[in-house]
Amino acid sequence: MARKKIENLSFEESLVELETIVQNLEQGDLNLEDSMALFERGLHLSQHNQEKLKGAEQQINILLEKNGQAQLEKFNTNETNSSE
């Protein structure tokens, strides 16, 4: 099965392939050359996803600015409720 070029993958397709690559590498059943090839593709997929996310964030910022809204605030996932 031929792989799609990374630039032609959607964010979701790229993420699924990246997850598969991680699973394959974690199993440790591949030879060195195959592992290195998968690792390299995984790096490119990760970069592709980062670019897609940055583009989405820029679009959101533009939409917020057009509607007179403030900039996005950073979301900290490590914060806990202070009422607990």
Image: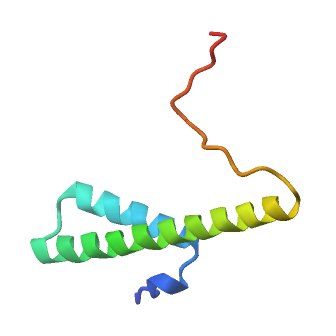
Q: Could you tell me residue 29's position as x and y percent? A: 17, 63
Residue at the left extreme? 32
Left or right of 1 on screen, residue 33: left
Residue at the right extreme? 67
As displayed, is residue 82 above or below residue 38?
above
Residue 10 sits in quarter: bottom right
Q: How many numbered tags mark residues here?
A: 0
| Residue at image coords 56%, 70% | 52
Left or right of 50 on screen, residue 42: left
Residue 27 sits in quarter: bottom left
Image quadrant where one finds the C terminus: top right
| Residue at image coords 57%, 22% | 80
| Residue at image coords 11%, 71% | 32
Q: Could you tell me residue 21's position as x and y percent? A: 34, 66
Give the image's coloring scheme.
Answer: rainbow
Left or right of 30 on screen, residue 63: right
Q: Depth check: 69 or 28 in front?
A: 69
As displayed, is residue 9 above or below residue 23?
below
Image quadrant where one finds the N terminus: bottom left
Q: Could you tell me residue 38's position as x and y percent? A: 27, 73
Left or right of 75 on screen, residue 68: right
Residue 76 sits in quarter: top right
Q: Could you tell me residue 47's position as x and y percent? A: 42, 70
